[in-house]
Amino acid sequence: MRLQAVHRLVRAYRPNATVRSVAVPIGTGRSEEEVPVPPLEIAERAGPIASGNFPAHYKEVGRLCREAITDRLPEGWTWEGKRALDFGCGAGRVLRHFLPESDRCLFHGCDIDEPALAWAIEHLSPPFELFASREMPPLRRPDASFDLVWAMSVFTHLEHESWSAWLLELHRVLKPGGTLIASYKGRRQQWLLGEPWDDERIGMHVRAAGLEWSQGGPAVFHSEWWLRAHWGRAFEIISLEGEGLGGQALAVMCRRDVELTREDLERPEPDELTAAVHQGRQLYGEAAEQRRIARERTARAARLAGRRDQLLAVEERRKERIAALERQLKRAREDNAKLERKLGHLTKSRSWQVTAPLRLAGTLASRASASRRESGA
């Protein structure tokens, strides 16, 4: 516990620091069940959570990802002395299920989501070494650092501006012959496209380009031929499985010993024109839709501003009426006070006191007259 406190103290002053000590064993002896589940607002940052039993669903998704990874490791794989990276680890939904192996393998994790990463550092480090990444490379790790990298629901959001940079970065940090396992959206996810799946037209296809990460980010789809043509330049494609990870497809790859640039990876194939035209039309359509939404929002804002001005005018008139009534009330109170002072002076005067018997006699006479009228009736 004292060493964990030192780790947290260092991170408090250096949030992006990775703390290591040769005196600290890699494993902690904990099981996944001993680790708490992050709060819903943290967990949902990695994607929507199914209604119902949130903790059970969160753990089950992580467990399925672990199985998808371990079932596809190279023949003869052992964890002994290995180093692995969870690229896009979030709050550790997948990493937590590798606690049993953490005494034999050094696991790293990175993410751009600071709240999720902070939660993971607090609850999962050690044994896992966690660090912040940015929207673009590099990662703060030397060349050939890892035997295994997995990226679950990462390349499903990386657009044309960033996918090649990150694929090359993972190629850099993997050891020669290292394994990369990455999920992607393929034919099975065509329901998200809103159109029939057409391999030739899809290629690499981006929907909701530029959408903020807080809103889920863009959705990126890949045809298998495109992955083989582009990802295959940096990695040997071992398998592309349309149902490899439940709701997503899964690519299993082995690092090629090649030197490439982003231009090398992005260079189009001769038959990519159809996909490029389709993507261009899609982006044009999305831009037109965004302009339409912007016009509607501008018009709605103008209507709301007009209504606001009307309400402000009504409120101003109401305030003026209240002020006028308050002035009238003030004058009435002042007049009433004057009358009360005059009455006080009158009742104290000599004439008022001298005529008191006459007023009493008049009152008695009035009462007698009224009594006679009632008797006569």
Image (cartoon, rainbow, N blue to C red):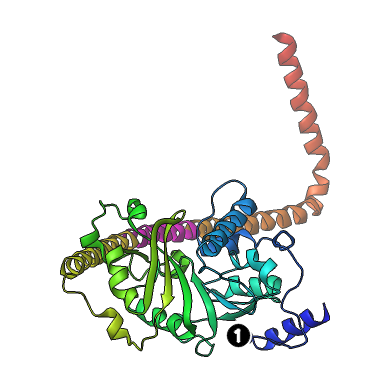
Residue pointed to by mark 1:
16
| Residue 202, horizontal then vertical, whole percent | 25, 62
| Residue 62, horizontal then vertical, whole percent | 58, 60
* Residue 162 in sight in this render: no
- Magenta highlight on residue 312: yes
Magenta range is: 303-320
| Residue 36, horizontal then vertical, whole percent | 71, 62
Q: Which residue occupies the foreground of this view, 298 or 59?
A: 59
Residue at 42% across, 61% down = 312
Count of marks overlaid on the render:
1
* On-image quarter of the C terminus: top right
* On-image quarter of the N terminus: bottom right
Instruction: Quadrant for residue 8, please give it.
Output: bottom right
Q: Which residue occupies the foreground of this view, 49 or 243?
A: 243
* Residue 368 in sight in this render: yes
The overriding secondary structure of the stretch rendered in magenta is helix
Residue at 52% across, 68% down = 75
- Mark 1 neighbour density, 10 Å: few (under 14) some (14–19) many (20 or more): some
Three-letter amino acid code at the position of disc 1: Asn
Residue at 58% across, 62% down = 43
Residue 169 vertical position relative to residue 351 in the rendered view, above or below: below
Residue at 59% across, 81% down = 131
Residue 225 vertical position relative to residue 112 in the rendered view, above or below: above
- Magenta highlight on residue 86: no
